[in-house]
Image (cartoon, rainbow, N blue to C red):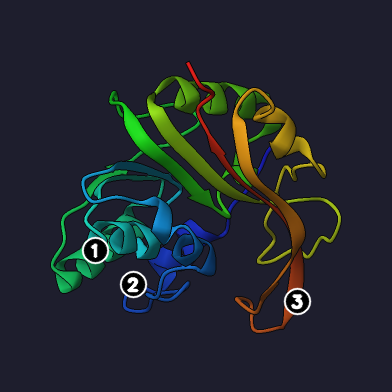
Amino acid sequence: MTTRSPWALEYARRPDEYVLGTAPSAFARMLRSLLVPGARVLELGCGEGRDSVFFASSGCDVTAVDVSAAGLRKAERLARRAGVEVRWVQSDAARYLPKDQFDFVYSCGAIHYVPRRLRAGLLARVKAATSPIGVHAHLVFTDRTIYVEQNERIDYFTAGELGRVYADWRVWWNGHGTITCDRDGRPHLHSVEELIARQPEA
């Protein structure tokens, strides 16, 4: 399937406005207690940087990847305003990741834009790039409740798919539900799967 995210175009079309806001997502806030100062964090699909800046403001060493140059310019402005540093990497995470080892790998509403044919490879690479005590946390859209925004094309996760990918890890949380959204001006719902998992014991 060919996917299409509308957000890079929106970031460029509205250069002086934070399309998704500047406050951290509810998912990022939920994970704050898992992060220790100095933890090496990798965010996949960081957009305009709100969660990466939140993690950096919590004392983490953050690397953030996104395809959108316009989004990353706004992310850098947000980081400067918060007085923190983040390594911003313009890249398609499905095809390139920074060569490093990370303690925490995170994505929120991003990797469902990765086509299914590339998804397994991406998740295998980030698993391999995770420290022995590393944690992964992802929020993805599933196919239970579909609402199409801005003519996007998503390769939706099926219910339970994310949990199955991490069946060989210690899963701390695997939740299913819906989130509310109004980014296109109309209140609507998306069905989601959330997962928090840790490397298996050696």
Give the residue drawn at x 83%, y 51%. Answer: 143
* N-terminal-most mark, 1 or 2: 2
* Foreground residue among 85 and 6: 85
Which label number is shown at residue 15? Answer: 2
Image coords of residue 110 (percent x, y): 55, 50
In front: mark 3 or mark 2? 3
Q: Amino acid at mark 3?
A: His
Instruction: Report the residue that reaches farthest toward the top.
Output: 202
* Foreground residue among 52 and 3: 52
Is residue 161 shown left or right of residue 22? Answer: right
Secondary element at image label 1: helix
Secondary element at image label 2: loop
Determine which residue is flagged by label 1.
57
Determine which residue is flagged by label 3.
188
In front: mark 3 or mark 1? 1
Q: Amino acid at mark 2?
A: Pro
